[in-house]
Amino acid sequence: MNTEPWVTAEQVSQHLGVVKDTVYRWRERKGLPAHKIGRLWKFQLSEVDEWVRVGGADEDSERKSLDHAAEPEADKA
Protein backbone atom coordinates (compact mmCIF):
# COMPACT_ATOMS: atom_id res chain seq x y z
CA MET A 1 0.00 0.00 0.00
CA ASN A 2 1.35 3.40 -1.00
CA THR A 3 1.29 5.85 1.90
CA GLU A 4 2.88 8.72 0.01
CA PRO A 5 0.90 11.91 0.62
CA TRP A 6 -0.90 13.77 -2.14
CA VAL A 7 0.43 17.28 -2.69
CA THR A 8 -0.96 20.40 -4.33
CA ALA A 9 0.23 22.20 -7.45
CA GLU A 10 1.63 24.89 -5.15
CA GLN A 11 3.74 22.29 -3.32
CA VAL A 12 4.95 20.83 -6.63
CA SER A 13 5.88 24.32 -7.83
CA GLN A 14 7.94 24.91 -4.69
CA HIS A 15 9.56 21.46 -4.99
CA LEU A 16 10.60 22.13 -8.61
CA GLY A 17 11.31 25.85 -8.26
CA VAL A 18 8.75 26.97 -10.84
CA VAL A 19 5.54 28.99 -10.66
CA LYS A 20 2.22 27.21 -10.15
CA ASP A 21 1.01 28.11 -13.66
CA THR A 22 3.96 26.14 -15.06
CA VAL A 23 2.86 23.05 -13.12
CA TYR A 24 -0.62 23.26 -14.64
CA ARG A 25 0.79 23.92 -18.12
CA TRP A 26 3.13 20.93 -17.86
CA ARG A 27 0.21 18.76 -16.72
CA GLU A 28 -1.86 19.83 -19.72
CA ARG A 29 0.79 19.99 -22.45
CA LYS A 30 3.60 17.69 -21.36
CA GLY A 31 1.93 14.94 -19.39
CA LEU A 32 3.07 15.81 -15.87
CA PRO A 33 1.50 13.00 -13.81
CA ALA A 34 -1.50 14.27 -11.87
CA HIS A 35 -4.71 12.88 -10.46
CA LYS A 36 -7.98 14.77 -10.34
CA ILE A 37 -9.60 14.38 -6.95
CA GLY A 38 -12.97 16.09 -7.02
CA ARG A 39 -12.23 19.36 -8.77
CA LEU A 40 -8.63 19.60 -7.55
CA TRP A 41 -5.47 18.27 -9.18
CA LYS A 42 -3.19 16.36 -6.80
CA PHE A 43 0.30 15.03 -7.33
CA GLN A 44 2.71 12.54 -5.82
CA LEU A 45 6.27 13.82 -5.68
CA SER A 46 7.73 10.41 -6.56
CA GLU A 47 5.80 10.47 -9.87
CA VAL A 48 6.77 14.09 -10.51
CA ASP A 49 10.45 13.37 -9.82
CA GLU A 50 10.43 10.35 -12.16
CA TRP A 51 8.75 12.45 -14.89
CA VAL A 52 11.51 15.06 -14.52
CA ARG A 53 14.23 12.35 -14.56
CA VAL A 54 13.01 10.95 -17.89
CA GLY A 55 12.98 14.40 -19.49
CA GLY A 56 9.35 15.45 -19.17
CA ALA A 57 10.30 18.98 -18.16
CA ASP A 58 12.80 19.49 -20.99
CA GLU A 59 12.12 22.66 -22.98
CA ASP A 60 12.45 20.74 -26.25
CA SER A 61 9.68 18.29 -25.33
CA GLU A 62 7.02 21.02 -25.41
CA ARG A 63 8.49 22.76 -28.44
CA LYS A 64 8.55 19.50 -30.42
CA SER A 65 4.97 18.63 -29.54
CA LEU A 66 3.78 22.14 -30.45
CA ASP A 67 5.77 22.09 -33.72
CA HIS A 68 4.30 18.71 -34.61
CA ALA A 69 0.76 19.92 -33.89
CA ALA A 70 1.29 22.93 -36.16
CA GLU A 71 2.44 20.85 -39.14
CA PRO A 72 -0.15 20.64 -41.92
CA GLU A 73 -1.45 17.17 -42.71
CA ALA A 74 -0.23 15.62 -45.93
CA ASP A 75 -2.74 15.52 -48.77
CA LYS A 76 -4.62 12.25 -48.76
CA ALA A 77 -5.15 12.12 -52.54
Image (spheres, rainbow, N blue to C red):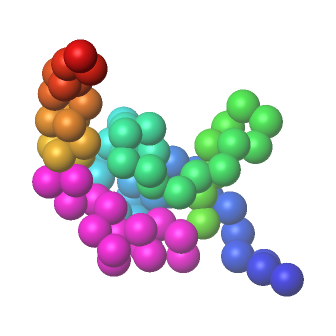
Total number of numbered discs in the rendering = 0
- Is 16 on the left or on the right of 47, as rendered? left
Q: Magenta span: helix, strand or loop, mainly?
A: helix
Q: Residue at x 76, y 43 (%)?
A: 37
Q: Quadrant of residue 76?
A: top left
Residue 75 shows in the view: yes
Look at the image and tell me in which quarter the N terminus lies.
Answer: bottom right
Task: Tell whether position 44 is magenta.
Answer: no
Residue 55 point in image, percent of width and height: 28, 68
Residue 23 shows in the view: no
Out of 46 and 77, give the one closest to the viewer: 77
* On screen, residue 46 above or below 40: below
Residue 33 point in image, percent of width and height: 53, 57
Residue 62 point in image, percent of width and height: 23, 45
* On screen, residue 61 above or below 63: below
Task: Tell whether position 52 is magenta.
Answer: yes
- Is 64 on the left or on the right of 16, as rendered? left
Q: Residue at x 23, y 16 (%)?
A: 77
Q: Residue at x 17, y 46 (%)?
A: 64
Report the magenta residues as a range: 45-61
